[in-house]
Amino acid sequence: MQFDHTYFMQQALIEAQKAYDKNEVPVGAVIVLNDTIIARAHNLTETLHDVTAHAEMQAFTAASDFLGGKYLKDCTLYVTLEPCQMCAGASYWTQIGKIVFGAADPKRGYQFYKTTLHPKTKVEGGVLEQECAYLLSKFFIEKRNLN
């Protein structure tokens, strides 16, 4: 069966909801190889007390462990929010084949900081953008209202 970007981004949104349910910034990620999800992850920065525990970083580690190697050349990362410069930098070292993200992050995303991706990495943004942005907006509105 052939899946599409929408299906895999929906899977990343399921991960984002898990983060939301844990009071984490709701970002989720999946890594796909040959139409098979080989890694699922969501933000765990609060849970792990680790500023580097972004969804993408967790997914890179899980995918590399699954494959038994550090390079993800034939894989696609689906993530609900445009990667930050740290995650984009890590994606460079994994040599990930493609990044597909949902919502753009104009203030903290890798594009704002002009972070270099691996030259062979392809990027596509805006997949289920509204759904991805909604969950993030809801989370931060609730946070502001609690304070």
Image: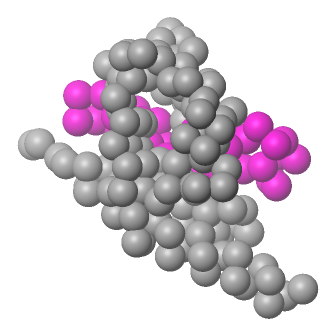
The N terminus: image quadrant: top left
Residue at (54% x, 60% y) in the render: 16
In the figure, is residue 100 to the left or right of 80?
A: left
Tag count in the figure? Answer: 0
Residue at (41% x, 71% y) in the render: 131
Q: Is residue 29 above or below residue 27?
A: above
Residue lying furthest bottom in this view? 145
Q: Position of residue 15 (x, y in %)?
A: 51, 57
Examine the structure image and report whether residue 47 is included in the region drawn in magenta: yes
Q: Is residue 110 above or below residue 14?
A: above
Asked whether 45 or 133 is in front, the reply is 133
The image quarter in which residue 136 lies: bottom right
Q: How does the figure colour the protein chain or chains?
A: one colour
The image quarter in which residue 115 lies: top right
Q: Position of residue 25 (x, y in %)?
A: 69, 62
Asked whether 67 or 85 is in front, the reply is 85
Q: From this viewpoint, is residue 66 visible?
A: no
Q: Position of residue 78 (x, y in %)?
A: 41, 44
Residue at (72% x, 84% y) in the render: 142
Q: From this viewpoint, is residue 31 visible?
A: yes
Residue at (26% x, 55% y) in the render: 7
The C terminus: image quadrant: bottom right
In the figure, is residue 100 to the left or right of 4?
A: right
Examine the structure image and report whether residue 42 is included in the region drawn in magenta: yes
Asked whether 112 or 35 is in front, the reply is 112
Q: Position of residue 11 (x, y in %)?
A: 38, 55
Q: Is residue 61 above or below residue 108?
A: above
Residue bounds of the magenta highlight: 29-58
